[in-house]
Structures are given as structure tokens and as C-alpha cells.
Amino acid sequence: MSSTFGSQPANGKSLLVNGRSPWVWALRRAVAGILILVVTVGGAAWLLYATIDQEAEASTEARALRKTVIETPARPTSASLVTTTVDTRH
């Protein structure tokens, strides 16, 4: 019983890339590519986050909150919703 790894040429010799199977080469390239992608996306996200001015963000949120408080009508509380009943029986 023989087992084959990867493709073999017609002359019967196994095909090796730098002394290793082509699958090892492809797997190493894929891992390196994924690592480069993760580092690039992580670095871009970190740089984007670093460009946010925290003080300007806080003042913008405070202005939005003040605007919401001014424009929002007062909501009735549960105490003001309670109606008093007048007993008309004597």
C-alpha cells in the first residue's frame, strides 16, 4: 500500500519545494498572509482611534445632551398621573 502526498511527477520522484511538501509551503504562506492582514487592520484601527479628540468628543456630547434636555417636553410622573376621586356619596 502506498500513500501519496501532494502531486508526483511521472518519473516517480516526489515533488518537493525546498525539501518540503508543497502543502507546507502553502500553509506557511497562508499563515504569514493572515498575520500581515491582522497586524495591518489592527494598526489601522488603533490609528483611527488615536485620532479621535477626547475633549472635542466630550463637548459635542454635552451640547447634544443640553439640546435634548431643552427640546424634550416634561414627561408626566407617576405621581401626577394619579387622579383623586371625589366621593359624592354623603
Image (cartoon, helix red, strand yellow):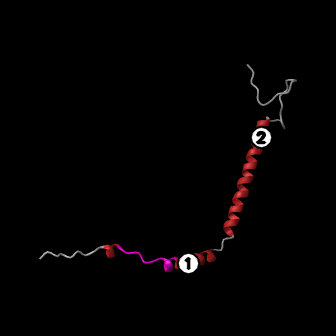
Query: Is 71 part of what is drawn in magenta?
Result: yes
The residue lying furthest to the left in this view is 90
Q: On the image, numbered disc 2 is attached to which residue?
A: 26
| Residue 58 spot, x, y in % from top left | 59, 76
- Where disc 2 sits, the SS reads helix
Q: Residue at x 51, y 76 (%)?
A: 68
| Residue 13 spot, x, y in % from top left | 85, 26
Q: Residue at x 29, y 73 (%)?
A: 82
Type of amino acid under label 1: Ala
Quadrant location, the C terminus: bottom left
| Residue 46 spot, x, y in % from top left | 68, 64
Out of 85 and 47, give the one closest to the viewer. Answer: 85
Vertical relation: 35 (above or below) 27: below
Q: Residue at x 55, y 78 (%)?
A: 62
Query: Is 24 part of what is drawn in magenta?
Result: no
The residue lying furthest to the right in this view is 11
| Residue 72 spot, x, y in % from top left | 48, 76
Answer yes or no: do the residues labelled 2 and 1 have beta carbons within 8 Å? no
Q: What's the CA distance linking mark 2 and mark 1?
A: 54 Å
Point out the stretch of residues depicted in magenta: 68-77
Q: On the image, numbered disc 1 is attached to which residue?
A: 62
